[in-house]
Amino acid sequence: MRITGTVPQRENPIIDLGHNLRVPTFIDVQGTDVNGYDLTMKVEYTPSSGRYECRTLTLTTPDAEITGESLRSIPVQNILKDGVVSALSAVTALNMGVIPQDVTEGGPTTSALSWVSYVYRVALILGESPVQGVAGALNLPKSTANRWITRARDRGLLDVQDKRGRRDREDSDT
């Protein structure tokens, strides 16, 4: 299976999410030999959800019929994520550059916390756990990543939160 994502050349507004994070509105994702199928996916960044969402999915195969069972075998969310990561790799380099190898050696410095904020935001866009994203990208234990995320918030470097798994206060009153 091979997944690639590209930023289409058509009119494609760049969305400024703040704190050195700018992303294209649209991304095209191509998948080759995904469980025997080829696919194309059009994804769009949706501000209301804060992440990329699939808008169209085209599945083709020269050898077999496309059935409901075959459709269920396509890992749409994983393909979307891999395609967006592929497309955003160039954008990430333009936004912040490459994460320095020693960014965490001095503890939670302003530079390190800026990276915490950046990685957190990218994880949210991809629909991943931001704490795991920060821990993995910066090679930190999850508990340390959690503490550094709190410090980044306290210093005003991070002003978004992962809303997944949270209930609205009105929902809990009923």
Image: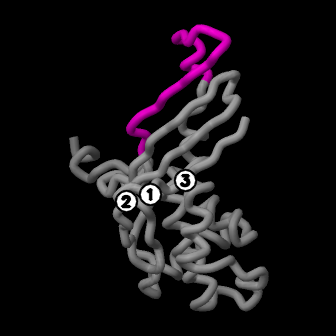
Spot occupied by residue 124 in the image (x, y as percentages of width and height): 49, 58
> What kind of residue is marked 3?
Thr
Q: Nearer the viewer, residue 39 or 55?
A: 39
Which numbered disc flags the more N-terminal residue, 3 or 2? 3
At 64% from the left edge and 10% from the top edge, which residue is drawn?
64
Q: For the magenta stretch, what is the residue range?
A: 53-73
> In the rendered image, which quarter contains the N terminus?
top right
Nearer to us of marks 2 and 1 is: 1
Spot occupied by residue 112 in the image (x, y as percentages of width and height): 63, 84
Determine which residue is flagged by label 3: 6
Determine which residue is flagged by label 2: 12
Based on the picture, tell me whether residue 65 belongs to the magenta stretch: yes
Spot occupied by residue 109 in the image (x, y as percentages of width and height): 62, 90
Q: Quadrant of residue 174?
A: top left
Q: Is residue 64 above or below residue 35?
A: above
Based on the picture, tell me whether residue 108 belongs to the magenta stretch: no
Determine which residue is flagged by label 1: 9
User: Helix, strand, or loop for circle 3?
Assistant: strand
Q: Are marks 3 and 2 in contact (CB under 8 Å)?
A: no
Nearer to us of marks 3 and 1 is: 1
Q: Are marks 2 and 1 in contact (CB under 8 Å)?
A: yes
> What kind of residue is marked 1?
Gln
> What kind of residue is marked 2?
Asn
User: Helix, strand, or loop for circle 1?
Assistant: loop
User: Helix, strand, or loop for circle 2?
Assistant: loop
Q: Is residue 1 above or below residue 14?
A: above
At 61% from the left edge and 19% from the top edge, which residue is drawn?
61
Q: CA distance from mark 2 to mark 1?
A: 7 Å
